[in-house]
Amino acid sequence: MTSGKGCGVCKIVGLLVGLGALNWGLVGLFQLDLVARLAGEMSGAARAIYVLIGAAGALKLISLVKCCPCQGKGCETKS
């Protein structure tokens, strides 16, 4: 999961991680939780969004040490 060329999953993961980071920035700067405001305070939809963003963050962390299968042989080892 690297930037630039990549599979659709890699792009979605990057987008979700970016949105999560922006949301945390808004929480820190303005005490504004955009997910809660749009989906409702800890509603089912908000919880689903938080879970998706958390899973994307975990996948992004894994990508620091393991290459995405879509990269094939063009991915150098990240150790």
Image (cartoon, helix red, strand yellow):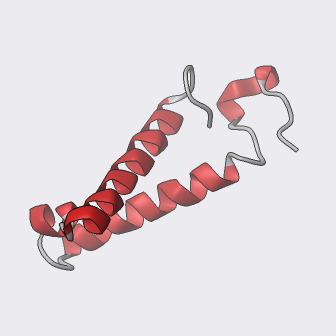
Q: Residue at x 18, y 66 (%)?
A: 32
**Up-down relation of residue 26 to residue 2 (above or below):** below
Q: Position of residue 49 (x, y in %)?
A: 30, 62
**Up-down relation of residue 40 to residue 65 (above or below):** below
Which corner quadrant holds the N terminus? top right
38 or 12, nearer to the observer = 38
Q: Residue at x 37, y 56 (%)?
A: 20
Image quarter for residue 12?
Answer: top left
Which corner quadrant holds the C terminus? top right
Q: Residue at x 11, y 66 (%)?
A: 37
As drawn, is 14 to the left or to the right of 43? right
Q: Position of residue 34 (x, y in %)?
A: 18, 61
Q: Residue furthest bottom?
A: 42
Q: Residue at x 25, y 59 (%)?
A: 26
52 or 28, nearer to the observer = 28
Q: Position of residue 21 (x, y in %)?
A: 39, 54
As drawn, is 15 to the left or to the right of 78? left
Number of on-image labels: 0
Image quarter for residue 42?
Answer: bottom left
19 or 1, nearer to the observer = 19
**Up-down relation of residue 65 to residue 76 (above or below):** below
As drawn, is 28 to the left or to the right of 4? left
